[in-house]
Image (spheres, rainbow, N blue to C red):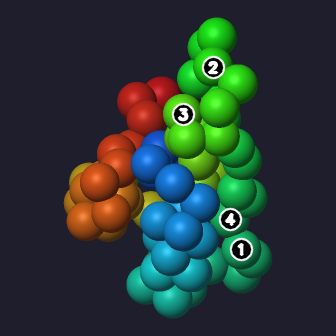
Amino acid sequence: MSLRHVLVLPDRDAAEEVAEEVVDRFGLPEEPQLVRDALAGEDDAEDAQWLVVVEDPQARLDPTALDALAATHEGWLEAP
């Protein structure tokens, strides 16, 4: 069963750091995808969140560990 984990971060720098840490910590074969997520009704770049989309084809990643990693950068793991 393949899973997709989405970590929500407050800015691009935090998202890039978390993406690198996810690869290093969990030994992922490829970099997670970074996606800018503008908040509804906001055009200002200051109001954008960044998503780190982690593909987990073998469902082996621990959601609790991913959430803790995101929390160290003022983010969280989006509930499925």
C-alpha gap between disc 4 and disc 3: 22 Å
Instruction: In this rendered view, identify the residue nearer to me: 28 or 33.
Output: 33
Snapshot quadrant of residue 74: bottom left
Question: Disc 2 residue type?
Answer: Glu
Q: Are marks 4 and 1 in contact (CB under 8 Å)?
A: yes
C-alpha gap between disc 1 and disc 2: 28 Å
Comes first in the chain, label 1 or label 2:
1
Comes first in the chain, label 4 or label 3:
4
Q: Nearer the viewer, mark 1 or mark 2?
A: 2
Comes first in the chain, label 1 or label 3:
1
Judge left or right: residue 49 versus residue 77.
Answer: right
C-alpha gap between disc 2 and disc 3: 6 Å
Q: Are marks 2 and 3 in contact (CB under 8 Å)?
A: yes
Circle 4 residues within 10 Å: few <14, some 14–19, many ≥20: many
Q: What residue sits 39% from the left and 44% below the top?
A: 77
As helix, strand or loop, the secondary structure at mark 2 comes to: loop
Residue indicated by mark 4: 32
Instruction: In this rendered view, identify the residue nearer to me: 71 or 6.
Output: 71
Residue 57 visible somewhere in the drawing: no
Q: What label does residue 42 carry, if any? A: 2
As helix, strand or loop, the secondary structure at mark 1 comes to: loop
Q: Are marks 4 and 2 in contact (CB under 8 Å)?
A: no
Q: Position of residue 47 (x, y in %)?
A: 54, 33
Circle 3 residues within 10 Å: few <14, some 14–19, many ≥20: some
Residue indicated by mark 1: 31
Residue indicated by mark 3: 47
C-alpha gap between disc 1 and disc 3: 25 Å
Q: Nearer the viewer, mark 1 or mark 3?
A: 3
